[in-house]
Image (cartoon, grey):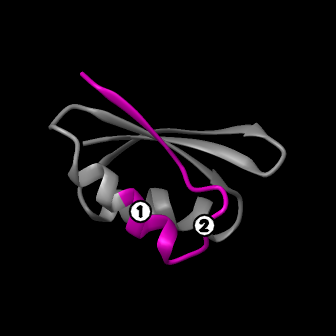
Amino acid sequence: MAKKTLDITREHCPMTFVKTKIELSRLSAGDTLEVLLSEGEPLDNVPRNAQEQGYEVVSVEHVEGTTHRVIIKK
């Protein structure tokens, strides 16, 4: 099982999920993607959109300041 990290803390919607979806498409089934993002719209939208696309959101946690970590499994 591979794990990849994507930092989209400087991105804004809708690019946050566009970049997340591109990275997820590169993974093999069972791999996980660690997404670092900012609170607000990205934190609301990326986990919800990933679930709507059929991915498993394993965890959402606060890292520091306005940064959060979302683990998504393909």
In which quadrant of the rendered view does residue 74 lie?
top left
In the structure shown, which secondary structural element does the residue marked by tag 2 occupy?
loop
Decide which of 53, 13 is in the foreground and name it: 13
Q: Which residues are magenta?
A: 1-20
Is 10 in the magenta? yes
Say whether residue 59 is left or right of residue 33.
Answer: right
Residue to which mark 1 is pinned: 19
Is 74 in the magenta? no
Disc 2 residue type (three-letter): Glu
Label pair 2/1, CB-CB below 8 angstroms: yes
CA distance separating discs 2 and 1: 9 Å
Where residue 68 sits in the image (x, y, percent)?
66, 45
Number of residues whose C-alpha sits closer than 10 Å to that of mark 2, classed few (under 14), some (14–19) or many (20 or more): some
Where residue 11 sits in the image (x, y, percent)?
60, 66
Task: Kindly identify which numbered label has been placed on residue 11.
Answer: 2
In the structure shown, which secondary structural element does the residue marked by tag 1 occupy?
helix
Quarter that holds the N terminus:
top left
Say whether residue 64 is left or right of residue 51.
Answer: right
Residue at (66, 61) in percent of width and height: 10
Disc 1 residue type (three-letter): Lys
